Every structure is written in C-alpha cells, then in structure tokens.
Image: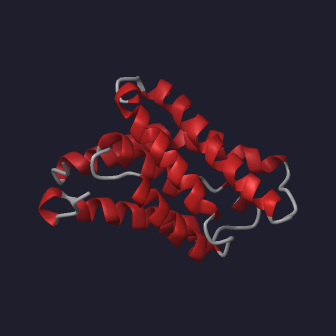
Amino acid sequence: MSLFPARGGLVILITLCIALTLTILPLPESVREFRPQWVALVLIYWCMALPHRVGVGFGFSFGILLDVLTGTLLGQHALGLSVVAFATVKLHQRVRVFPLWQQSLVVLVLLVVEHLLALWVMGAINERPPGLIYWAVPPIGALLWPWVFVVLRDLRRRFHVR
C-alpha cells in the first residue's frame, strides 16, 4: 500500500478528505437525514479501481476519522467501512465489468450492509433505533453512484493515478 505522490496517492487522500468534508457539512434540518454516505461511496470507488492500494486499512482509518468528526461511538463507522472495503476488494474484478446501473445495485447492497452494521452497533449500545427514514440513504447513494464514478474516474485519468 504505497502512497507516493508520483503515482497519485495524494489524489486518493484528497478525494477521501473531500468526502469527509461533505459528510460534516452543515445542512438544514429537513434534509440532514438524507445526506449520502460520501466516504463509503468514494472508498468503494477507490477499492474497485485500485484494490492493490486502497483496502481495509483505508476503510478503518477513514472510519475512525468519520467517528471522531461525527461524534459517534469510536469504531462504529470503522467497522462498517472496513467490511465494505473488504467486500469491494474481493468483488472488484466482477463488479468493474458491470454497466453503471448494475454497479449501482452492487453499491446499494454495500451501503445497506454498512447501514446494517451501524444499526447493529446502535443496538449493542442501547441507542434508540432510527425511524424508517434511515433506510432512504442507501438508495440515494446508489442513485449518486454513476456521477461519483464518472467524476473520480476522470480525476484518476487526469492525474494518472495508478
């Protein structure tokens, strides 16, 4: 897992930091529950595009950062993003050949898994379970996937990230 700037490692870190920023960006109360899982979407892309460089370690590290930034239980997002990164790295050769609409379905499943793990952690610490609106976020992420994919692919090609 090398992050040499000559090979575009800085681009990977910057995109993940932008995803963290989008996650903590203040939003009106009426749309706060519909905030996409930006870090998970960007992590899925990089794990799919460069599985030899981005994997479970990135998922765990940025999950811990996300836990600290959002004030959740330390390790809650780290667990979910690590599992998502592991599954994406294991399935990357199959999923990369799918058209974008089929990739969106796979991304939907991965985002639901991340949400289920977060829900499991909430239950383990006796936190009050969220309402049904909680389940609106993974489909929003799946709908955003084609645009996330195209933007990150363009960045990867422009900066020759290998």
User: What x and y, as percent, mark residue 27?
Assistant: 65, 68
User: What x and y, as percent, mark residue 53?
Assistant: 28, 52
Q: Residue at x 33, y 66 (%)?
A: 14
User: What x and y, as percent, mark residue 137?
Assistant: 67, 47
Return the residue found at the far front. 124
Return the residue found at the far left. 6
Residue 49 against residue 29 in the figure, above or below: above
User: What x and y, as percent, mark residue 76?
Assistant: 64, 63
Residue 67 against residue 2 in the figure, above or below: below
Front position in the image: 136 or 3: 3
Give the total number of marks visible in the rendering: 0
Q: How is the image coloured?
A: secondary structure
Front position in the image: 155 or 60: 60
Q: Residue at x 82, y 57 (%)?
A: 123
Residue 29 against residue 161 in the figure, above or below: below
On screen, residue 60 versus residue 158, left or right, reads right
Q: Residue at x 59, y 36 (%)?
A: 108
Front position in the image: 66 or 15: 66
On screen, residue 49 versus residue 82, left or right, reads left
Q: Residue at x 57, y 75 (%)?
A: 69
> Which quadrant does the N terminus fall into?
bottom left
Residue 7, picture quadrant: bottom left
